[in-house]
């Protein structure tokens, strides 16, 4: 425990902040606790094993477009795994599935992505996993949906080891090994995987049959223990978390279970059952934005491991909250929109109170642990994590190929295609459908300027008028995954599927028609009444100002004044 004098000093520093502690008070208090923690004698190191775990990546391979804290990226994850290898005596890298395809929430009637693009993304992800050093991968539904032949080939070509104890093909043959017994820093670790789905007909269509996962798991535990496994790790992809709990409760002998599918953030591993040495569940959310890391310290010959994770968890949360405070303090003085200003100010109050509570909790931590112990961390893959050069090269090559294909007017990406967007000419098919009313198409801001020069002048002073430049600064101005929200009409009904045309001066930047709709009918009409949308509902803006792109801070009423001025809307 901390010395009484130090506890008193921390209390005084924190009281200085009163109801809303100042940043100085926070930093001083947290620095005192950090210094005290660093001064405490650490438990015995023992043999130090790190398990780097992930699942639910859903075909994401690079950081998100979040303006405040862009999270994720295979290159950042590789850097964190390299850090673990430098710190631990041995590292085991595992994944519990749903890697190769996005979540299965395709709107009815949308077109499937091109098979060539699914293959290309799968090859990138598999090559990156090989470079990450993944030693055991268990497929989930979003992997099995590739179909057995394609999935086996992609994984085999990249030499990614697969473990699956209960999946067989439609003839009853096991496509992969059931388990692996690995030596990690002199400790035998057994790893096996099980997969199940509520939709057996889909599984069979993909070429798979899932046998009873609980029975397969029990057989694997017995086999691995008989072969000398000191630690047993299960990769469990069986649906909602309740299904995982039931399976693990029926499978004594599992030490750690990495979950797929449920996409939870288990900063504190969840113990299944009442036994202190029962299985503990691990999961690090979804879409590759976080890396899970379990540090195991084998100190004695006992089977039990006790948690030292509360301290590590609080320190991680504190660091995250301090980063958020620094960002909001930077944004607040330059924010002119009243509602957004109030939002930032309120977030600062909430975060500072949270830091106060967390600092106090750190001070009240129990005495040190002895014997075998573990720490679990969910590491945000933010800007503090550098890109690992090897994986970054794979990603860069993939992005350059995407740009080349887009210039050739070919479909790019693995997300479903909007059926209302016309396919490129090479993919057009004849139709016998009766002709319908003419569809408006996009014409560009120059056409609007002929009659609405004042409104276009207002637009020239907004960030929308420079939207494409933001991508150019990030070297993504030809990326099909980013361009649609930074130009006019690209991949929209009545717009172009040609990225060359989309980024030309006519359609560059977020123009009038992104908000008011395509303008060709309006331009040609003798009577302009009811030929174009005059009022813009919030739903139009939210199509691009999504929570991950606007830091959960998009407020329609607060942002509207930034695009309204005399001559445009007033």
Image (cartoon, rainbow, N blue to C red):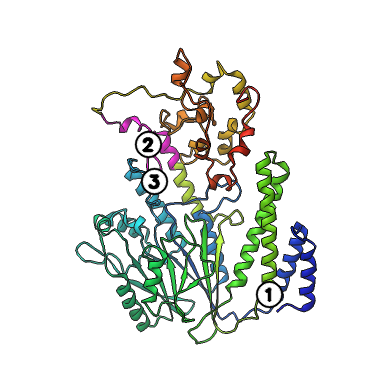
SS state under label 3: loop
- Tell me: residue 441, above or below residue 235: above
The answer to which of marks 3 and 1 sits earlier in the sequence is 1
Q: Which residue is mark 3?
A: 414
What is the distance, in whole Å, between disc 2 and disc 3 at their CAs? 13 Å
- Tell me: residue 346, above or below residue 258: above
Quadrant hosting residue 199: bottom left
Q: Which residue: 47% across, 68% down?
A: 282
Q: Which residues are drawn in magenta? A: 401-430
Do we see residue 73 in this rendering? yes
Reply yes or no: does residue 417 show up in magenta.
yes
The residue most toward the left is 171
Q: Mark 3 touching mark 1, by CB under 8 A? A: no
Which is more foreground, mark 2 or mark 1?
Answer: 1
Q: Which residue is mark 2?
A: 410
The answer to which of marks 2 and 1 sits earlier in the sequence is 1
The residue most toward the bottom is 301
Depth check, front residue: 345 or 468: 345
Q: Counting other residues with Cα less than 10 Å from the Cα at mark 1, is it few (<14), some (14-19), or many (20 or more)?
A: few
What is the distance, in whole Å, between disc 2 and disc 1 at their CAs? 59 Å
Q: Position of residue 182 (x, y in %)?
A: 41, 75
Q: Which residue: 54% across, 66% down?
A: 267
Q: Which residue is mark 1?
A: 364
SS state under label 2: loop
Quadrant hosting residue 26: bottom right
Q: Position of residue 142 (x, y in %)?
A: 36, 55
What is the distance, in whole Å, between disc 3 and disc 1 at their CAs? 49 Å
Residue 454 is left or right of residue 96, and the answer is right
Q: Position of residue 58 (x, y in %)?
A: 42, 53
């Amino acid at each position: 425990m901390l010395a009484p004098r130090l506890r008193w000093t921390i209390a005084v520093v924190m009281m200085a902040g009163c109801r809303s502690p100042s940043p100085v008070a926070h930093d001083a208090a947290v620095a005192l606790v950090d210094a005290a923690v660093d001064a405490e004698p650490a438990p015995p190191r023992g043999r130090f094993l790190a398990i780097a775990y992930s699942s639910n990546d859903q075909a994401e391979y690079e950081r998100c477009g979040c303006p405040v804290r862009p999270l994720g990226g295979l290159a950042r994850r590789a850097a964190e795994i390299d850090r673990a290898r430098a710190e631990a005596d041995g590292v085991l890298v595992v994944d519990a599935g749903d890697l190769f395809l996005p979540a299965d929430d395709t709107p009815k009637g949308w077109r499937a992505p091109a098979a060539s693009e699914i293959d290309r993304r799968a090859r990138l992800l598999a090559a990156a996993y090989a470079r990450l050093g993944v030693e055991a991968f268990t497929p989930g539904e979003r992997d099995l949906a590739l179909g057995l032949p394609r999935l086996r080939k992609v994984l085999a070509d990249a030499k990614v080891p697969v473990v699956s104890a209960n999946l067989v093909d439609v003839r009853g043959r096991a496509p992969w090994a059931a388990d692996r017994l690995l030596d990690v820093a002199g400790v035998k670790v057994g790893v096996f995987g099980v997969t199940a789905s509520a939709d057996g007909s889909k599984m069979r269509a993909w070429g798979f049959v899932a046998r009873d996962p609980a029975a397969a798991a029990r057989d694997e535990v017995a086999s691995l223990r008989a072969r000398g496994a000191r630690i047993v790790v299960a990769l469990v992809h069986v649906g909602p978390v309740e299904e995982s709990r039931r399976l693990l409760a029926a499978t004594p002998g599992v030490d750690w279970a990495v979950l797929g599918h449920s996409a939870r953030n288990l900063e504190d591993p969840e113990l299944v059952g009442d036994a202190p040495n029962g299985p503990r569940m691990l999961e690090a959310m979804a879409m590759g934005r976080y890396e899970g890391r379990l540090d195991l310290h084998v100190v004695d010959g006992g089977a039990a491991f006790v948690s030292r994770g509360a301290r590590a968890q609080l320190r991680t949360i504190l660091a995250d909250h301090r980063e958020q405070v620094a960002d909001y303090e930077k944004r607040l003085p330059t924010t002119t929109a009243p509602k957004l200003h109030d939002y930032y100010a309120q977030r600062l109050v909430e975060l500072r109170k949270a830091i106060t509570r967390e600092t106090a909790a750190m001070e009240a931590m129990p005495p040190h642990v002895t014997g075998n112990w573990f720490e679990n961390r969910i590491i945000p893959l933010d800007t503090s994590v550098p890109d690992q050069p090897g994986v970054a090269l794979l990603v860069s090559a993939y992005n350059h190929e995407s740009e080349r294909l887009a210039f050739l007017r070919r479909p790019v990406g693995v997300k479903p295609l909007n059926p209302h967007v016309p396919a490129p000419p090479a993919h057009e098919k004849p139709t016998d459908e009766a002709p319908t009313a003419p569809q408006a198409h996009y014409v560009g801001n120059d056409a609007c300027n002929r009659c609405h020069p004042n409104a276009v002048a207002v637009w020239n002073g907004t960030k929308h008028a420079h939207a494409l430049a933001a991508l150019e600064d990030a070297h993504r101005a030809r990326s099909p995954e980013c361009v649609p929200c930074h130009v006019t009409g690209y991949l929209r009904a009545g717009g172009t599927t040609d990225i060359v045309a989309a980024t030309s001066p006519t359609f560059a930047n977020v123009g009038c028609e992104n908000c008011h709709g395509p303008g060709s009918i309006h331009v040609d009409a003798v009577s302009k009444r009811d030929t174009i949308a005059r009022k813009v509902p919030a739903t139009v803006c939210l199509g691009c100002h999504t929570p991950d792109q606007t830091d959960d801070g998009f407020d329609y009423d607060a942002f509207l004044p930034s695009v309204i001025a005399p001559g445009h809307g007033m």
